[in-house]
Amino acid sequence: MTDRILLVEDDHAVRTLVRLLLEDDGFEVVESANGNNAVEEFGVRPFDLVLLDLRLPGLSGFDVCRQIRRHSDVPIIMVTAQNDSHDVVAGLELGADDYITKPFHDRELLARVKAQLRRRQGNADPERSAVEIGDLIVKIDNGQVEKGGKALPMTRTEFRLLCHFVTHPDRVWSRGQLLEQVWGYAYEGDGRVVDTHMARLRAKIEDDPSQPEYIQTVRGLGYRLPKRSQ
Amino acid sequence: MRFFPRGLRARTAVFFAVLALLLSLTLSAVTYELTRGFLLGQRETLATRQAMGNALVAKELIASNRTDDNIMASLGSVTNARALLRVHGAWQSTVVDLNESRIPQSLIDLVDTSGPARQRVVVNNQPYLVVGAPLTGLDSAYFEFLSLAEYQHTLETLSRVLVVAAAVTTVGGAVAGWLASRLLMRPLASVAGVAQAMSAGDLAQRLDVGHDPDLEPVAESFNEMASSLQQRIEREQRFTADVSHELRTPLTAMISAVGLAQRAELPDRAKFAVDVIGDQVDHMRRLTLELLEISRIDAGVADLDIDDVDVVEVTQQILNAAGVPLDRFRSDLGATTVFSLDRTRFERILANIVENADRYGNGVTSVSLARSHDELVVVIDDGGPGVPPDERIAIFGRFHRGSMEQPHDRPKGTGLGLSMVHEHVRLHGGSVYVTDAPDRGARFVVKLPVQP
């Protein structure tokens, strides 16, 4: 089955060329020239990935991201025109999984898209289908997280990030390693992607996100899930 | 060398102190002179009156035709005065030490020619007033030494009091100056606070204009300046963002188009043409990104995104990515390898110098990290011919084309790499320079301030 990608981009030339490139690699692409149309398209049929330009006429990329996240955990890669603007962090905070900055190379774009799609398979540990940490239950095989008997909604990236720590406890992971392991980057990425997702994850699993007890920050090194004496 | 304090407050305090000192010195001098004149006049009048009385006693004693010794003894016991008598040219005195040799000749002459007179003298460090009067009709003269010690003592006490008063006034003046300047400095401190907040990025900060008619114009013009600065910076930011977007989108289209064309089976000539376009578009892409970053820095809208950075880890990553063997890397940092830096800029600094070494210096031969006081020192050596001394500053300029030949076997450099290094380092408040490596080649030294 071919993966279906929703391509939201207002520039006609870029949109057409990116569609051709993606189709060349065997993806099915649905084009959308503005935010309102993108939200409509998303309601009509399922997609495996959304490629979302942030600067759109009408409904902005941020709004589209927010609306999609309301009822879907589909991977979203946002396209920004400025790599150090606040756009990146704002988009990640709204639940985008990754971002790519214009002007990008076709091979860079394809690598990101494929990394996001590959991750759907996950790296579930067949030995353990569920892990309990305190009052947190992570069901690795079916992608669910419960805390105190209540299910926590998560995007795929957040879930994979949590699973990564749960299956590798008591080890410090640098941002670069997490990008490689969780996002599937084979090249240098942006640590803010990790930090923003970590903040979103903490907001969901921690009682007090400013005093995290599950995944802790190791200054200058990265993050760690300490082993618990239970 | 004269002493000029640098600070406004210290200067004000010194000014007040000097003013107070001059005032109190003048007042003291006037007070001293007036008091001295008054006390001396009073004392001399009294002394003269007393001496004249004693002279009458002496005159009677002489007139009663006693013997000389008797006269002196009686004079001593009756008047208790330190008196001298000259009877028919012969001197006698009640006190041995105070004899005629202690009386100035001018005074004796004055008494002989024009009658009673007085003069101040010092005998054995003791101040005296000598009063002389002729004893008319007896061919005699009476002289008396009257002590001014008490008067002298009073004056000394007075002058001591005045000196202490002057000192106290001076210190008081200094304190008053210090306090006054603090009062005056308070509005300046709030100006400094707002200016600091603005340079830290909070452009909406304004001074409280208040109701002080003296300060209002200053506060208002400061706020006007702040507003126009804010507008200009925001305009620059918008412009940079717009330009950025407008350039990036067509570049993306071009890169994608080239990518698409390169996938197709093309005749040789067309393939060559597409490849040339691809190289040029890629060059333009790098140039655009670097120019945009430079324009952000120039516009003052680029700021540091400070993070805890493990510099050893980052350096190793950069060297790995550039294919530099890690045995050329050395860290003298010890256990502390995490510093507060802008991670992305630190990476760009290293990557650009490494790329420069690759392009012009036969690659990196050694990289070291060290700590010197409160600076992180990065030293990168290459194995090339080095940088001629007259190019060592210019090499950090934009689009600098040195005497080095561009290598043809790789994409053209943008000519902005080292100027970017310079800007990133400058944003950190650090420095970068190039010198000779120990075994020829160029040595780039980057120093970034870090918390001790």
Image: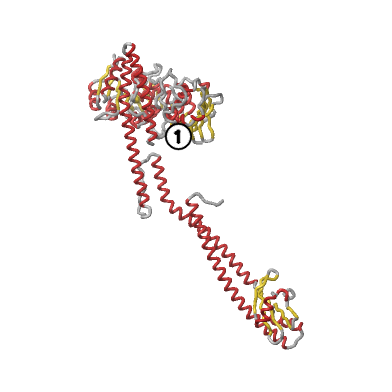
Residue at x-position 57% and y-position 65%? B161
* Residue A204, x across and y down, in percent: 35, 30
Q: Is residue B234 above or below residue A216?
A: below
Disc 1: host chain = B
What colour scheme does the image use?
A: secondary structure
Question: What amino acid is found at the position of numbered circle 1 in the picture?
Answer: Arg
Viewer-nearest residue: B387 or B63: B387
Q: Is residue B261 above or below residue B354?
A: above
Relative placement, left or right, of B196 versus B326 is left
Q: Secondary structure at mark 1?
A: helix
Relative placement, left or right, of B324 versus B138 is left
* Residue B342, x across and y down, in percent: 43, 32
Viewer-nearest residue: A116 or B19: B19
Where residue A135 sits, quadrant-wise, is top left
Relative placement, left or right, of A184 versus A56 is right
Question: In this figure, what is the number of numbered marks?
Answer: 1
Q: Is residue B328 visible?
A: yes
Q: Is residue B445 visible?
A: no
Where residue B272 sits, quadrant-wise, is top left
Where residue B70 sits, quadrant-wise, is bottom right
Relative placement, left or right, of B167 versus A225 is right
* Residue A155, x across and y down, in percent: 33, 25
**Location of mark 1 (residue):** B426
Viewer-nearest residue: B27 or A38: B27
The 10 Å Cα crowd at callout 1, few under 14, some 14 to 19, many 20 or more, is some
* Residue B36, x across and y down, in percent: 58, 71
